[in-house]
Amino acid sequence: MNRVWARVVMVCALSSLSSLASHGAVAQVARIAPISGSIDAQMVRVGDMLRPPPSPPSNDTPELRGQALHQHVLDQMKARFDAAADPSTHLLTQQAAKDHGMGYIADHFQQIDRNGSGYISFEDFRSFLRARHGVAFSNN
């Protein structure tokens, strides 16, 4: 049998077995050696279980709103601040803010550091945000 007929027979066989599988027959796809080294062929073996692909992971996290969203934003800001701050003092310098990509803090550092100490706490940052942006950063 020449190559063209071999491919036609294989396609027909695969189509038939696929049809059986879609009508409730059980099958499994297995790799076999390519014909004439030119194509990869697959063979379906009847008798083994065919399962649908797994569902993609879903994002079952509820949408945050109100106080929960507010707290989530504050927690994220605090985590980022703490990652850049000195671990023993929990204070942030202007250079550390720059080094950790916290441009907003670095650009407004002099306004946040009201006493001119050269470092700020997270509460200093929140006070600055409260004064600048009001209710969005209040304690409630």
Image (tube, helix red, strand yellow):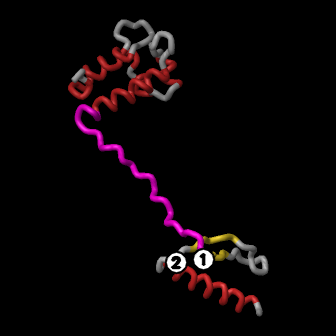
Amino acid type of disc 1?
A: Val
Query: Could you say which disc has been placed on residue 25 in the image?
Result: 2
In this picture, is 55 found above or below 102? Answer: below
Amino acid type of disc 2?
A: Ala
State yes or no: discs 1 and 2 in contact (Cβ < 8 Å).
yes
**Which element type, helix, strand or loop, lies under badge 2?**
loop
- Could you give the CA–CA distance between mark 1 and mark 2, rounded to whole angstroms? 7 Å
Question: Which residue is denoted by mark 1 in the rendering?
Answer: 46
The answer to which of marks 1 and 2 sits earlier in the sequence is 2
Look at 39% across and 48% down and name the residue there.
Answer: 59
Q: Quadrant of the C terminus?
A: top left
In this picture, is 71 found above or below 44? Answer: above
Look at 77% across and 92% down and name the residue there.
Answer: 2
Residue 60 inside the magenta-drawn segment: yes
| Percent position of residue 109, x then y | 40, 18
| Percent position of residue 77, x then y | 38, 27
Who is closer to the viewer here, 95 or 33? 33
